Image (cartoon, rainbow, N blue to C red):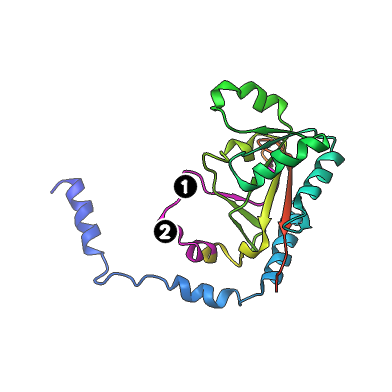
């Protein structure tokens, strides 16, 4: 008997006679985090993402554009990258230029304007699919209208979040939204500005992505 055969024979000999039962994931999560109101989840999400150095502003569905202008003006930012095919991108394109903020629509292949994107675009606006209260995490699903580079390259990343879409846990988000039915090429979980501690064990922000993460959280009609 070869060495390979002896190893395989031992493995077969030590196999359990019956397959181990699958863990009851749903049951564990059902008791892990009690049900919360939408307002409670919004407060918990805000607490944890602010601990990670993100900024959060409560806004109304009709008034988030004004807060966006205030955020940009306070930083003397006069150019914003948006997805022009999205409803929020269209609002920004229609209204912000009148207030002195030039809006750049992400409508070209990256190869044709890589230099401009990487060196001359100070901020971007994207929307979140939802969020996770337990960890203070945004959920983004990049697509052709809002590609991954919009949340990765500009130094300031601004995210529009509907607080009604905040879930208690990651498991709840996956099951409630039926992620098993299909995922995008990139499903992003963002819990603050980019950071690294690789250099001399000192935490540094903005090392490989946005230096600032700003959340405009729509909290209308939360119970």
* SS for callout 2: helix
Name the side, left or right, on which 118 lies relative to 184.
right
137 lies above or below 153: below
Residue at x 67% of width, y 62% of height: 163
Left-right relation of 203 to 100:
left
Q: Is residue 175 magenta?
A: yes
Residue under label 1, please give it: 184
- Counting the numbered discs, the total is 2
Q: CA distance from mark 1 to mark 2?
A: 11 Å
Question: Which is more toward the observer, 3 or 25?
Answer: 25
Q: Nearer the viewer, residue 63 or 136?
A: 63
Q: How many other residues sit within 10 Å of disc 2, few (<14), some (14-19) or many (≥20)?
A: few
Q: Residue at point 81% right, 40% down? A: 72
Which quadrant of the view contains residue 71?
A: top right
The dot on residue 87 is none
| Residue plotted at (60% across, 57% down) | 130
Q: Residue at x 85, y 39 (%)?
A: 73
Residue 137 in sight from this viewpoint: yes
Report the magenta residues as a range. Answer: 173-195
Q: Position of residue 14 (x, y in %)?
A: 26, 64
Name the image quarter holding residue 81.
Answer: top right
Does 157 sit above or below residue 9?
above
How crowded pointer 1 is (Cα within 10 Å; few <14, some 14-19, many 20+) is rated as: few
Residue nearer the viewer, 93 or 59: 93
Q: Position of residue 178 (x, y in %)?
A: 45, 62
Q: Is residue 128 magenta?
A: no
Q: Identify the element where label 1 is drawn.
A: loop
Residue 205 in sight from this viewpoint: no
Residue 156 lies, with reference to residue 189, above or below; the image says above
Q: Which residue is mark 2?
A: 180
Which residue extends farthest left? Answer: 1
Q: Whole-percent x and y of residue 168?
A: 61, 67
């Amino acid at each position: 008997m070869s060495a390979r055969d002896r190893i395989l024979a031992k493995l077969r000999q030590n196999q359990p006679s019956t397959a181990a039962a699958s863990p009851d994931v749903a049951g564990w999560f059902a008791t892990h985090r009690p049900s919360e109101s939408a307002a409670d989840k919004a407060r918990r999400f805000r607490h944890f993402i602010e601990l990670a150095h993100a900024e959060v502003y409560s806004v109304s569905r009709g008034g988030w554009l004004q807060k966006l202008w205030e955020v940009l003006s306070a930083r003397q930012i006069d150019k914003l990258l948006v997805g022009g095919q999205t409803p929020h991108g269209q609002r920004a394109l229609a209204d912000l230029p009148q207030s002195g903020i030039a809006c750049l629509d992400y409508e070209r292949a990256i190869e044709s304007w890589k230099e401009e994107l990487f060196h001359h675009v100070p901020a971007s606006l994207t929307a979140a699919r939802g969020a996770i209260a337990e960890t203070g995490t945004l959920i983004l699903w990049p697509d052709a209208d809002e590609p991954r580079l919009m949340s990765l390259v500009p130094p300031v990343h601004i995210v529009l979040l509907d607080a009604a879409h905040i879930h208690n846990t990651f498991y709840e988000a996956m099951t409630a939204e039926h992620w098993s039915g299909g995922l995008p090429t990139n499903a992003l979980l963002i819990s603050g500005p980019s950071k690294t501690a690789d250099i001399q064990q000192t935490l540094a922000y903005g090392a490989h992505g946005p230096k600032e993460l700003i959340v405009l959280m729509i909290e209308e009609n939360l119970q």
